[in-house]
Image (tube, helix red, strand yellow):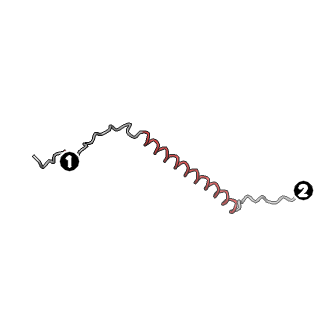
Amino acid sequence: MPDLQPVNRHWSPNLVLSLVTGTFLLGLIGVRAVSEGLTQLGLASEEYFRGERLPILQTDPEPSSRKNSNEI
């Protein structure tokens, strides 16, 4: 009968750290990419809807033609 040795079920801290670090960095890069994508989508939608909802306001071409409220 072969001599059975106990199985070491403890993970090496170096192995765990290397696995967690890689996963964390990939997640961080993914979150940054999603954030930039949503920012670009927001800017694009802002440009798309510019002027669609608000009426064009007519401005006075000569501001000096207005009378002051003090003049009667």
Q: Nearer the viewer, residue 70 or 29?
A: 70
Q: Which residue is mark 1?
A: 64
Taking 66 as reference, is 14 left or right?
A: right
Q: How many C-alpha atoms fall within 10 Å of the one at disc 2: few (<14), some, or many (≥20)? A: few
Q: Nearer the viewer, residue 66 or 1?
A: 66
In percent of the image, x 79 and y 59: which residue is there?
6
Q: Which residue is mark 2?
A: 1
Image coordinates of residue 46 in percent, x first then y, are 43, 43
Q: CA distance from mark 1 to mark 2?
A: 108 Å
In percent of the image, x 28 and y 39: which residue is there?
58
The kind of residue on which mark 1 rests is Ser
Q: SS for tag 2?
A: loop
Q: SS for tag 1?
A: helix
Image coordinates of residue 34 in percent, x first then y, are 54, 48
The kind of residue on which mark 2 rests is Met
Which quadrant of the rendered structure holds the N terminus?
Answer: bottom right
Residue 2 falls in image quadrant: bottom right
Earlier residue among tags 1 and 2: 2
Residue at the farthest right position: 1
Q: Is residue 20 above or below residue 63?
A: below
Q: Nearer the viewer, residue 12 or 41?
A: 41
Q: Which mark is residue 9?
A: none
Image coordinates of residue 51 in percent, x first then y, are 37, 39
